[in-house]
Image (cartoon, rainbow, N blue to C red):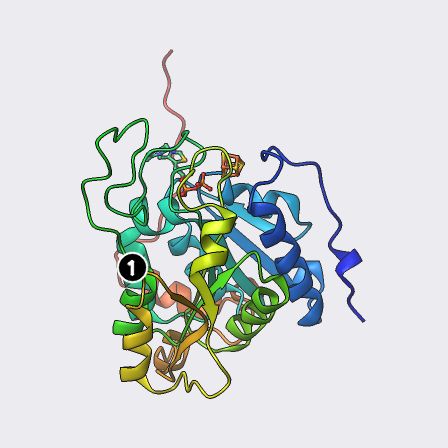
Amino acid sequence: MVDIKDYPEFETAWCPGCGNFPLRKAMRQALANLGLEPHQVVFVSGIGQAAKAPHYIPCNLFNGLHGRALPPAQAIKLALPQATVIVESGDGDMYGEGGNHFIAAIRRNVDITAVVHDNQIYGLTKGQASPTTMPGHKTKAQPFGAPSDAFNPVAVAVAMRANFVARGFVGDMDHLAELIVQAVRQPGFALVDVFQPCVSFNKVNTFQWYKQHCYRLDESYDPTDWRQAMDKAVEFGERIPTGVIYKGDRPTFEDRLPTAPKEPLARRGVDREALKRIMSTYGAPLKRPTKKAGP
Ligand SMILES: Cc1ncc(C[n+]2csc(CCOP(=O)(O)OP(=O)(O)O)c2C)c(N)n1
Ligand code: SF4
C-alpha cells in the first residue's frame, strides 16, 4: 500500500507561507490515495516558483523551458502509455508563455493532467501581472493597474469541452487532493486550476481573499451538463465556485490514433528487414566515409 510518507518532504526555495506548500501536500496525498508509486509518475514543468514543485517530489521529472511543459508531457505519455503524466506549473507558465500549448493540448486530448498553481501573478520574477491577474490590480510593473482583462482558464477549458475541468483552493486541502485524484483518473486532458496565495508579491488575492470568495459546488451540481458548466465557469466575482466544473467524454488522442503505442515505445522491436527495404527505396546503401589524406 502506498502512503503519503512514500513522498517525503524536501527543503525548498519557497517563501515561508507560500501557497505552494499546501498544494504540494495535496499532491502527495493524491498520489498516495491513487496508490501510485513514485516510479510510476512523471512530472513535467516549465519555469517559475510553481514549476519547482516537482523538484521536491521523488518521481520522474522533465523540467523544460518556460511555457513549454505541455508538449513534452504529451510526448512522454504517448511514448510511455503506462506512466501517469502530471504537468505542474504556474499560471504564467501555462496560460501566458504556454497559452497556445494549453489550447492545443485541450484539442488534442492526450491523457495527461495539468495542475496549475494559480497565484494570479508572476512570482519568480517578482510580481508582474500574469494572464490571470485581475484588471486594475496594481503591481510594481503596472503601477496604474493591470490594463488587460484576465484570462479565465476554466471557461476556456469548458468552452473547448476538455474532458475534466476543476478549480481548487489550497485552503481546502482534502477537497483539492480529491480533485487531483479525479483528474488523474479521468481519461484525456484534465485541468485543475488551483488558487494559491503568493504571500510576497500578490497583496490583493490573499489567503483571506480566496477564503471569502470561494465556495464549493454542492452535491446536486451535475458536471456533465455543459451549459450549466459554462455558467459556473464564468462565475468569477463576489463568488467563485470550486469543485469539478465540467466532465466530458471526448475520445482521447490515443484512442483516435491507430498507431499510438500500447506499450513503452522503447520496448518496441525493430523489423530490420522492413527497415532495409525502406532504406533501399532511397537509392544506394550508405557507405562508411573514407578517410581523406591531408591536415
Ligand atoms: C521565454 C522566457 N520568458 C520569460 C522568462 C522569465 N520568467 C521566468 S519565470 C516567469 C514567470 C513565472 O510565473 P508563473 O508561471 O505564474 O509562476 P510562479 O513563479 O508565480 O509560481 C517569467 C516571466 C523566462 N524564463 N523565459
Ligand atoms: S514569491 Fe510568491 S510564489 Fe514565489 S515562493 Fe514566494 S510566495 Fe511563493
Quadrant showing the N terminus: bottom right
Q: How many badges with numbers are in the image? A: 1
Relative to 87, is 124 above or below? Answer: above
| Foreground of the two, 235 or 27 | 235
Quadrant showing the C terminus: top left
| Foreground of the two, 107 or 271 | 107
| Foreground of the two, 108 or 244 | 244
Specify whether residue 160 is in view.
Answer: no
Element type at marker 1? loop
Residue assigned mark 1: 152
* Label 1 lies in ligand 1 vicinity (Cβ under 8 Å): no
Q: Position of residue 162 (x, y in %)?
A: 35, 73
Choose top left, top right, bottom left or bottom right for residue 259. bottom left
| Foreground of the two, 93 or 133 | 133
Choose top left, top right, bottom left or bottom right for residue 188. bottom left
- Three-letter amino acid code of the residue under disc 1: Asn
Identify the residue at horizontal 45%, vertical 63% (top origin): 214
Crowding at dot 1, Cα within 10 Å, few <14 / some 14-19 / many 20+, comes out as some
Q: Where is residue 120 in the image (x, y as percent from the top left)?
A: 38, 46
Looking at the rendering, the quadrant in which ligand 1 lies is top left
Relative to 92, is 248 above or below? Answer: below
Pick out the residue farthest to the top.
295
Specify whether residue 49 is in view.
Answer: yes
Q: Position of residue 5 (x, y in %)?
A: 79, 57
Q: Position of residue 31 (x, y in %)?
A: 66, 64
Identify the residue at horizontal 44%, vertical 44% (top origin): 46
Q: In this view, does 248 lie to the left or right of 200?
A: left
Q: In this view, does 132 lie to the left or right of 291?
A: left
